[in-house]
Amino acid sequence: MRKPLVVANWKMNPSTLAKAKKLFNSIKEGIRKVRNVEIVICPPFLYLPQLVEFLYRCRKSQLNLGAQDCFWKEKGAFTGEISPLMLKNIGCQYVIIGHSERRRHFNETDEMINKKIKAALKAKLKPIFCVGETGEEREREETSKILKSQIENGLNKISKKEIKNIVIAYEPVWAIGTGKPCDPDEAMRMSLLIRKIIAQIYSRSISEALPTLYGGSVDSKNAAKYIKEARMNGLLVGGASLSSKEFIKILKAIS
Ligand code: PGA
């Protein structure tokens, strides 16, 4: 069985560098007893160079850093943006792309997400590509249609070779930050649906090898169900990753 991948999305937290270092260090300490889980911490951009320093001082570790977003150009006149090349250069291995908060608050479209995924791959970063329906779309029974179009458009012109470096995170928008996680049965159906869509675009073997994550109100009580029952290959954790104690509990629950 593939090693589960657990991604911590700190979003715009914590509020100071000192707190970020403290949180990172206590996670680093706590994972000494955790086996067979790959962990990726995605802090705000500003903290990345500092936290990379801590990573260098780790023994051969299961811990990596990722960013929460990137732009699609390598460099140039794009005020306020960060390029995948810069992220790779500073020591990131992963980048979250297409998170629903970016789709909603920053009007990110599938086309923009597609350009970001291509740019990240070019810079040798692994994209964690987020997809998921809103509560209204789910009520209108449009989930399959939404996932299909997000995946087809997001992966437009991405080759069979490139797709092997992508992780897909199923994050139902209605479950994010609400304390109402998706039922593991439903998460399993969505994971199968995602694999079916990938098999149609690429091939069955590619879809079977594709790592899928679940995200949305994950905590230490429900974490194991998504791996064992829903057969997801990992988790994308928001709120619960801001407490080292709770985050370590999640890791132990699935390791
Ligand atoms: P949550 O966030 O765990 O706080 O629901 C998940 C996410 O947005 O990735």
Image (cartoon, rainbow, N blue to C red):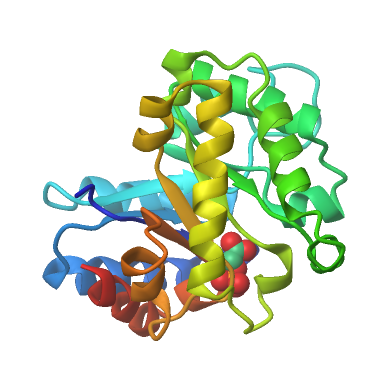
Looking at the picture, how far across and down is residue 240, in whole percent? 49, 77
Q: Is residue 244 visible?
A: yes
Q: Nearer the viewer, residue 128 or 73?
A: 128
Q: Quadrant of ligand 1?
A: bottom right
Dividing the picture into quarters, in which one does residue 27 lie?
Answer: bottom left
Q: How many marks?
A: 0
Q: Nearer the viewer, residue 55 or 178?
A: 178
Where is 246 relative to 68, above or below?
below
Looking at the picture, how far across and down is residue 184, in whole percent? 48, 72
Please tell me which residue is depicted at 66% across the width and 35% down the height of the picture. 151
Please tell me which residue is depicted at 77% across the width and 29% down the height of the picture. 112
Where is 188 relative to 160, above or below?
below
Looking at the picture, how far across and down is residue 158, in whole percent? 58, 17
- Is 8 left or right of 116, judged from the image as shown? left
Please tell me which residue is depicted at 36% across the width and 69% down the height of the picture. 229
Q: Is residue 15 visible?
A: no
Where is 173 relative to 112, above or below?
below
- Is 228 left or right of 236, judged from the image as shown? left
Where is 232 relative to 97, above or below?
below
Dividing the picture into quarters, in which one does residue 78 lie?
Answer: top right
Image quadrant containing the C terminus: bottom left
Looking at the picture, how far across and down is residue 200, in whole percent? 57, 26
Please tell me which residue is depicted at 27% across the width and 77% down the height of the picture. 253
